Amino acid sequence: MEALIRFRLDPRTGLPPSRQLVDQIRQAIRLGRLLPGDQLPSVRDVVGQIPINPNTVHRAYRDLEQLGLVDARPGVGTFVAAQARRAIAQDRLERLTHELQGWLTKAHRAGLDREEVLALVTAAIDARSARAPLLK
């Protein structure tokens, strides 16, 4: 059976190897390359793909489980969780909310009041909707 995901490590990123594995799996789920129920490669298979300590792979899989993206089934394997795509969507929403809060802080520092912010956001949505629907 061919692996559904091939891992790679890039030391230039500055990210720990376990984080790189987590990010690659999250991206594969986000893009639909890994679907709920798909089995992740065993730790042994990952170690065979890339030079990495098995404990690092275990850590990445444990982190993914804590994020709600995978389910570990002892003696069977690690599988993409049924709610994985929803968990990623929630994570994306939280990041966008954080970015919006930052933008609102900048708008406040620039002297915009609530009505001006709402007018600016409404104008941006209207301009975007004229090109392609943003919100339905």
Image: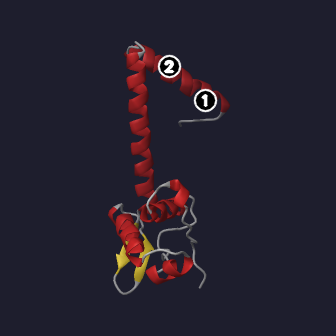
Left or right placement of residue 65 versus residue 135 in this view: left
- Label placed on residue 128: 1
Image position of 24 (left or right of 71): right
Q: Is mark 2 on a helix, strand or loop?
A: helix
The amino acid type found where label 2 is placed reads Leu
Which residue is nearer to you in this view: 97 or 132?
A: 97
Q: Quadrant of residue 95?
A: top left
Say few, some or many: other residues with alpha carbon within 10 Å of mark 1 (under 14 / 14 to 19 / 20 or more).
few
Where is mark 2, residue-wise?
A: 120
x and y, in percent, of residue 115 in the image: 41, 14
Which residue is rendered at x = 59% and y = 85% of the image? 1
Label 1 sits on a secondary structure element that is helix
Question: Up-down: is 73 above or below 66?
Answer: below
- Residue at left offset 38%, top offset 31%: 101
Q: How far across and down, in percent of the image, does residue 104 sit?
A: 40, 25
User: Which amino acid is tagged 1?
Assistant: Arg
- The label number, if any, that marks residue 63 in the structure image: none
